[in-house]
Amino acid sequence: MIDWPAVFEAELLRLGLQPGRARQLSEEATQEAADHAGTPADLFGPAHLYARHLVAELNAPDDQRGRQRYAPGPVFLSLAGVTKRYRRYTVFSGVDLTLRGGEVAAIVGANGCGKSTLLRICAGLTRPSSGAVRRTRRVGFVPQDGGTAGWLTAEEHFTLFGAAAGMVPGRARSTGVHLATRLAWRPSRRQRAQQLSGGTRQKLNLVLGELHAPDLLLLDEPYQGFDQGTYLDFWQQVFAWRDAGRAVVVVTHLLHDLQNVDHVLDLGGGGDR
Amino acid sequence: MTAFVVANLSTREVGRRWAALLLVAGLPLWFYLVRRDLAGQSTRMLTLGIGWAVSTLTLFVVNASRSVDPRLRLAGASVVSIIGGRLIAMTGVGLALVVGYWMLVGFDQDVLHLWAAGLMMLLTALVAAPLGSLIGALLPRELEGALALLSVCAVQMLADPAGTIAKVMPFWSAREVGTYAIDGGSLEMVWRGLAHAGVVWLLGTAGTLAIFQWRLRIARYPEP
């Protein structure tokens, strides 16, 4: 007989939930079935279909369901006294942040204040001049622009980034297509990245950042080129990631984004003068 | 695994740039046609054209992927698999060029040792890919990289083959193996050419990997 909770948990993981959250949902489903003196299959139907239904529910916007906040998980990112200097010029200094799974942090500030630099430091692509950084190993990074190969299709990007993360090509493609549909985008098999609109290319960027199911997502103003509807979908997606137990850092200069985020890191005035 | 996926997709990427690919594939042909009446000159110029074409193509491919590589590293790919994959792809493109032009020379010229002419082109294509990637690693901007390659190829063409300058140029192996292929003589020239190509390939590959190992390094933060 197929182990329903194991199949259910595996499908939740495949759909991008964090292991702890998937285990918790699997145990809750098993417990609920036991309370009704039945099996999970009798109560919920096939495990993989119920998993998809549940994830769709988690991703639904606030006005479609009461958004439940879960207790924050383990610390995925910790910055203590992080400073960045270029020769004598100090970009920022003494930045502190502790971000747990299930939390969203926004980095705000004027142009040139070092928002993107700080995000690159979080990713490990740039080194801080001083201070301590601790972060989880599984990290997804979405740059402000670029980051894709113009002559490759979306599915080829999924294959490439999936291979980098150790995924077999078929699974990488199916996961990528699935994640794209959550951003209301159905990738064409023939269309190359350079033929995509700016907003759709950013959706591709987001999917690539999420493809290997990272614990920590670092997003550098990823909504450039999004229309209003997609912009709102993006924030719903951020909150869905949060509810799935991930930690999310978003660089933004739009102050009205800041409601509902857990931490706001203001880097202040900029260096561009 | 990752290296082969990178190689496969890099080849597809290049294959879709029809105009660039045609211009690059045609470059050695112009070199060849200019001195077609002389078997030695035309074959050597053709070979240098292959070297220039493959190294330029590699330079542009390496530069075009500059924004993708850090993300691949963050996703878990090693520098060796990313850069190695691209070198495999560009070497493959070079080999395809070599096969085509070797057949052309075989049909169109009276060459003493045709196999050695093929070896000359093969060594040049093998050396050209790491040379292009090394210049791409050292000079991240395309214009600067292309000008540097132009300088290298021009010096290679103009330098006295017996002089020291020619010997430190990356495609000197073609000169040695080519002399045996066209004019005959001692097999020692072929071995010297093989050794020179081996050293240049090793330097180019190791240099490229070392620079990208540094450029694509990810800070190893402790876990919280």
Image: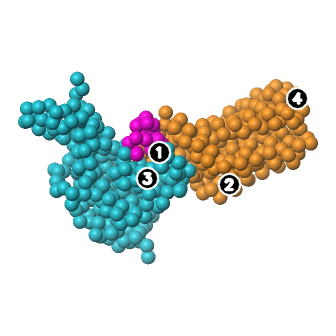
Chain colours: A cyan, B orange
Which chain letter matches label 1? A
- Residue A8 spot, x, y in % from top left: 24, 35
Q: In which quadrant of the rendered view does residue A45 lie?
A: top left
Q: Residue at x 40, y 45 (%)?
A: A176
The residue stretch that appears in magenta: A157-177
Which chain letter matches label 2? B
Is A71 situated left or right of B154 in this image? left
Question: Depth check: A6 or A165 in front?
Answer: A6
Give the labeled residue for mark 4: B112
Give the labeled residue for mark 3: A204
**Cα distance, mark 1 to mark 3?**
10 Å
Q: Nearer the viewer, mark 3 or mark 2?
A: 3
Q: Is residue A20 visible to the viewer in this orientation of the structure?
A: no
Question: Depth check: B162 or A166 in front?
Answer: A166
Which chain letter matches label 3? A
Q: In which quadrant of the rendered view does residue A248 lie?
A: bottom left
Q: Residue at x 85, y 46 (%)?
A: B33
Question: Depth check: B163 or A262 in front?
Answer: A262
Most extreme residue toward the right, as rendered? B37
- Which numbered marker is on residue B176? none
**Cα distance, mark 4 to mark 1?**
50 Å
Classify mark 2: helix, strand or loop: helix
Classify mark 1: helix, strand or loop: helix
- Which numbered marker is on residue A155? 1
Are the residues at dot 2 and dot 4 in contact (C-beta closer than 8 Å)?
Answer: no
- Which numbered marker is on residue B146? 2
Question: Depth check: A156 or A257 in front?
Answer: A156
